[in-house]
Image (cartoon, helix red, strand yellow):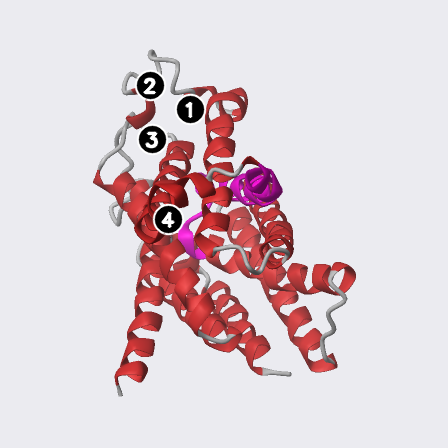
């Protein structure tokens, strides 16, 4: 029937958008099949600033649609903004670390490493939220952890064989992203549920305002200290300012990030955790398979792809066992 078709379309759309978002980031990094990387790199933090700004404005538009101008003003509650600020800071810092790691790793690797969120979340949920998992679930959690570490170890060995060093900076950035994403998720769950009668769009706007301000702080204060070449205020290095070196690829990232956030929220509302985990696993597998076309280390090491497949399969298994 129509509801079933709607569900299939929504899940399929999520897989396409989630896959497209990851591959577009590789495309924007100018990684092509002929391995050329021409032109100056865009400032990655600008993507996060624009995305959070668009998300905030879209939330205000929803408020205006439902409640007019009073609805817009109700979203600008300073107390609500402060309440969601910890959530915003944790998530924004996490995504910033992920964007920094794009300089070191391709989309497939980031997707696989990101599955470490599940074991970390399980551990934190047990310690701080008093959640319990069955013996079988803990076995699957350990399987995911071991498979992720095996993937990283194999990747390092492939690089060592090629006479290259391990990407410790990139690994540290990915680990920071995973930890901050998990902590942000726990704080977000508590914050959203602490006011169940509050309109969702008001909460979302409060969170997006925090994202926007934190992203601006990262762009103008933090990022230039660690990477002077990404200082958009230095017109010698960045003559185009905020939009320096932007093109259709960079715009595509913003579009995919925005679409992924909206469709992801719909998926969260409409489907069980099992469906979401399976959809996410399909997305990871799709990204990894496509990236084989331009990732030479994976083509040289079939074992790397087999371990990646174990990570994907064990993620689905965790969602299905009780």
Q: Badges 1 and 4: C-beta atoms under 8 Å apart?
A: no
* Residue neighbourhood size for the residue with mark 2, other residues' Cα within 10 Å, grouped as few (<14), some (14–19), many (≥20): some
Horizontal and vertical percent position of residue 93 = 55, 39
Which residue is label 2 attached to? Answer: 238
Which residue is label 1 attached to? Answer: 230
Horizontal and vertical percent position of residue 255 = 29, 47
Q: Badges 2 and 1: C-beta atoms under 8 Å apart?
A: yes
Upstream in sequence: badge 3 or badge 1: 3
Which residue does the image show at 65% across and 61% down from the upper left?
121
Which residue is label 4 attached to? Answer: 63
**What whole-number distance in Å separates the C-alpha atoms at marks 2 and 1?**
8 Å
In front of the other: 98 or 211: 211
SS assignment at label 4: helix
**What whole-number distance in Å separates the C-alpha atoms at marks 2 and 3?**
10 Å
Q: Badges 3 and 1: C-beta atoms under 8 Å apart?
A: no
Upstream in sequence: badge 2 or badge 1: 1
Can residue 32 be seen from the camera position used here?
Answer: yes
């Amino acid at each position: 029937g129509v509801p079933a078709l709607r569900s299939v379309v929504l899940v399929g759309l999520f897989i396409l958008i989630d896959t497209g978002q990851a591959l577009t980031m590789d495309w924007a990094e100018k990684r092509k099949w002929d391995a050329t990387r021409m032109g100056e790199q865009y400032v990655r933090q600008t993507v996060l600033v624009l995305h959070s700004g668009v998300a905030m404005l879209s939330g205000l538009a929803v408020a205006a649609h439902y409640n007019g101008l009073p609805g817009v003003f109700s979203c600008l509650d300073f107390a609500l903004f402060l309440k969601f600020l910890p959530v915003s800071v944790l998530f924004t810092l996490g995504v910033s670390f992920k964007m920094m790691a794009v300089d070191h790793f391709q989309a497939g690797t980031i997707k696989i490493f990101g599955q470490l969120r599940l074991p970390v979340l399980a551990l934190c949920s047990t310690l701080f939220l008093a959640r319990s998992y069955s013996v079988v679930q803990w076995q699957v959690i350990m399987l995911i952890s071991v498979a992720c570490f095996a993937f990283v170890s194999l990747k390092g060995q492939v690089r060592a064989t090629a006479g290259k060093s391990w990407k410790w900076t990139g690994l540290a950035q990915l680990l920071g992203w995973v930890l901050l994403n998990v902590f942000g998720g726990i704080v977000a769950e508590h914050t959203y549920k602490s006011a169940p009668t509050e309109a969702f769009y008001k909460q979302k706007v409060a969170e997006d305002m925090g994202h926007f301000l934190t992203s601006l702080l990262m762009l103008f204060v933090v990022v230039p200290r660690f990477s002077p070449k990404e200082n958009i205020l230095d017109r010698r290095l960045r003559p185009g300012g905020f939009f320096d070196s932007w093109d259709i690829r960079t715009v595509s990232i913003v579009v995919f990030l925005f679409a992924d956030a909206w469709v992801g929220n719909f998926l969260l509302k409409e489907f069980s955790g099992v469906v979401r985990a399976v959809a996410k696993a399909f997305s990871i597998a799709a990204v990894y398979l496509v990236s084989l076309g331009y990732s030479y280390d994976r083509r040289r090491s079939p074992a790397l792809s087999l371990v990646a497949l174990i990570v994907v399969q064990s993620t689905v298994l965790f969602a299905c066992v009780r």
